[in-house]
Image: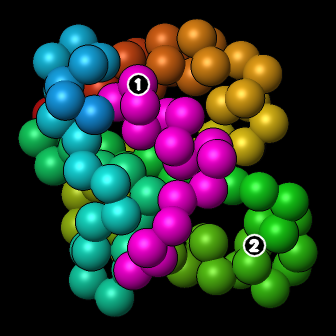
Amino acid sequence: MRSRQTETEKLLWFNLRGKKLNGIKFKRQAVIGPYIVDFVSFDKLLVIELDGGQHNSPNVIFKDKVRTKYLEDLGFKIVRYWDNDVFNHLELVLEDILLKTSTSP
């Protein structure tokens, strides 16, 4: 696990921790199988991943697809947000997360 959060992770975590978002419990940097996900709600089976520019490279795109398939096969819904969307449109990201949790188990 990474011991240091990115600035984007810090910002989103501040808004998710302590059940701040509609009483939903999230964990940060949780281990699921061979992967460490940025955030997860095990109750809602929702994984949140934050992506920076490195996620545009073909190699990382392929790895993300493999990772997503693995997690989806376990029953998780995966949502991805670009770092700049979290910084510039945080309220919209939080609203989208709420929407995704309302359609999860």
Q: Residue at x 43, y 73 (%)?
A: 3
Q: Residue furthest left?
A: 43
Label 2 vs 1, first from the N-terminus: 1
Q: Nearer the viewer, mark 2 or mark 1?
A: 1
Vertical arrangement, residue 105 with respect to residue 36, above or below: above
Q: Amino acid at mark 2?
A: Ile
Residue 47: in magenta span: no
Is residue 8 rendered magenta in the image? yes
Which residue lies at the image location 27% right of the left edge and 74% below the top edge? 31
In the image, taking residue 82 as reference, residue 6 lies left or right, namely: left
Relative horizontal placement of residue 6, taking residue 14 as reference (left or right): right
Q: Which residue is mark 1?
A: 15
Residue 89 x %, y %? 71, 17
In the rendered image, which residue does mark 2 sit on? 61
Q: Is residue 4 above or below residue 76?
A: below
Label 1 SS: helix
Task: Magenta stretch: give its range.
Answer: 1-16
Q: Amino acid at mark 1?
A: Asn
In the picture provided, is 61 more to the left or to the right than 15? right
